[in-house]
Amino acid sequence: MSVELAVLRTALATVIDPELRLPITELGMLEDVVIDDAGQVTVKVLLTIAGCPLRDTIVADATAALRQLPEVTGVSVELGVMTPEQRTALKAQLRPVRGIPFNRPDSLTRIYAVASGKGGVGKSSVTVNLACALAARGLKVGIIDADIYGFSVPGLMQITGQPTRVDEMILPPVGYGVKVISIGMFVAGNQPVAWRGPMLHRALEQFLTDVYFGDLDALFLDLPPGTGDVAISVAQLLPRAEILVVSTPQSAAAEVAERAGAIALQTQQQVLGVVENMSWLEQPDGSRIELFGSGGGELLAARLSQTVGSAVPLLGQIPLDIALREGGDAGLPIVLSDPESPGALALWSIAEKLLKRPRGLAGLKLSVEPL
């Protein structure tokens, strides 16, 4: 055949491992590729583990990539499994240094800790939709569902699969282009999680050290309501995390939410801004009914600005939207399923403000010395 093996390998370089989000050619998964005189290609691919849940996806993608070459008449994909030594080399390649990668001096990941003073304000829905909006814009995004007792992110994103384990490394499932990890993925059925503070800290620490997220542009943490153990653990484990406070228009809710943001004084974190949810119900004639009052978001932003001593903006107001509720129930984020709805437009507006804060070296200490 006139086609060179380099051409075949180039085609296979477009095949992305669904969990690691890197080409199989870079991961050492491509063991061999040959083509005979009739144009039949045989590919040998090594899976990270024998029970890889996405093996069929890899086979289909490799077949499609090679079928595009005019010289190829047929494709056969043979699957094998990496040896322990090959897996060790892969883990060393992906994570050469143990610890929390987002704390390394060269990490450019923006970390958003989404907090609220109390439950029921739509914090998880805001987290999921903002993450999916950024991913839809081409950013590499992850979510840690840190609400251990009230985990809901997998359901909001229609993720039913469990993470894949490569020895002690955990590969998070991907939904709508977002890598997600949640304690709900390790709990059978709808069993409650009854853990004390030290176990909560250890679970969050394991999510940050053992889960392979890769190089992210943005990492969202869906925190439990209030200022308890998890909020303190996040500050200890991720000191660079910025707090995004979600509240409703009620003045009483704003007072409670102020505590969630004011914790930044104790933890030395930055309060990124306030998101007001359930701001109003828009009528067919364009008028608005403010079911929960008004002004709570502005009041909260003003109070937090005074408390932390720096400007805390009101990033946006999200109206009550039936499509938003329906999307949450169906596991379809509204920013993707109904992007022109009032709720989605408000969420997109907030996401665009986050997009204007690109990764960079601002605030990082560089290891440079004058000559």
Image (cartoon, grey):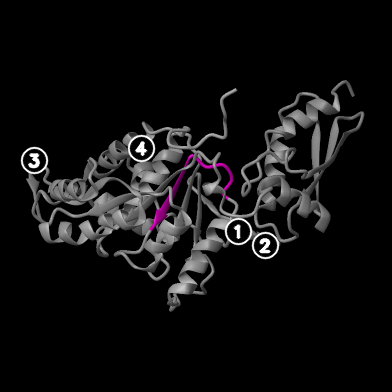
The residue that mark 2 highlights is: 168
Q: CA distance from mark 3 to mark 2?
A: 57 Å
Residue type (three-letter) at the residue carrying disc 1: Asp
Q: CA distance from mark 2 to mark 1?
A: 7 Å
Q: Name the residue: 38% across, 42% down.
A: 336
The residue that mark 1 highlights is: 210
**Cβ atoms at labels 2 and 1 below 8 Å apart:** yes
Q: Residues within 10 Å of mark 3 (few under 14, many from 20)?
A: few
The percent coordinates of residue 264 (x first, y second) are 31, 54
Q: Which mark is residue 354?
A: 4
Label 1 SS: helix
**Cβ atoms at labels 1 and 4 below 8 Å apart:** no
Compare marks 3 and 4 and give the one earlier in the sequence. Answer: 3
Q: Nearer the viewer, mark 3 or mark 4?
A: 4
Q: CA distance from mark 1 to mark 3?
A: 52 Å
Q: Name the residue: 43% across, 68% down.
A: 148
Q: Is residue 110 visible?
A: yes
